[in-house]
Image: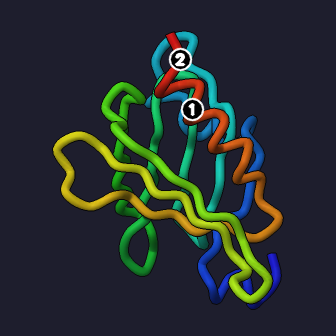
Amino acid sequence: MGLLQKLALNAQQIDVDKVQADLAPLLIENEKVEIAFKIIRDQIIFTNRRLITVDKQGITAKKVDYRSIPYDKIVQFSKESAGVLDLDAELKIWVASMSEPLKFEFSKDAPINDVYSLLSEKVLGP
């Protein structure tokens, strides 16, 4: 990840096998990580069952907040692709009972369309 991307706090795709192993104690039987991203120390993880955000807190990042959002609680989502001057793509996810959407910024080369398709499948699918 380049210095400018780190400073912009854009999400970068990370290895799903490593995330699967790291989250093994938190995942239910047959739950699989499908795609995952990292923003400095925090993570956005899409499994076949839910969206998980990982917020590492404090200087040492030993305190970690895991937020689990079942796909059936997502009521709306949008993506804004990167432009010529705006080098990041943005994903917004509205969750039932939350007044403001969750907002995630992705680097220009991140597969935002894959994430949007995955959300579409999980939220709108059978």
| Type of amino acid at the residue the image marks with label 2 | Gly
Category of crowding for the residue at label 2, using alpha-carbon neighbours closer than 10 angstroms: few (below 14), some (14–19), many (at least 20): few
Q: Residue 110 bears which disc, if any?
A: none
Observer-nearest of 105 and 113: 113
Q: Residue at x 41, y 63 (%)?
A: 62
Tell me the residue that label 2 is attached to. Answer: 125
Q: Do the residues labelled 1 and 2 touch (CB within 8 Å)?
A: yes
- Give percent across and percent down for residue 126: 50, 9
Quadrant assignment for the N terminus: bottom right
- Give percent across and percent down for residue 105: 58, 68
Q: In the structure shown, which secondary structural element does the residue marked by tag 1 occupy?
A: helix
Q: Residue at x 59, y 25 (%)?
A: 121
Q: Is residue 43 above or below residue 36?
A: below
Observer-nearest of 3 and 107: 107
Q: Which residue is drawn at 31% across and 32% down?
A: 73
Tell me the residue that label 1 is attached to. Answer: 120
Name which quarter of the figure residue 41 lies in.
bottom right
Q: Is residue 121 left or right of 28 when viewed as pictured?
A: right
- Give percent across and percent down for residue 99: 19, 57
Q: Is residue 60 left or right of 117 when viewed as pictured?
A: left
Q: Earlier in the sequence, mark 1 or mark 2?
A: 1
Q: Is residue 107 left or right of 97 when viewed as pictured?
A: right
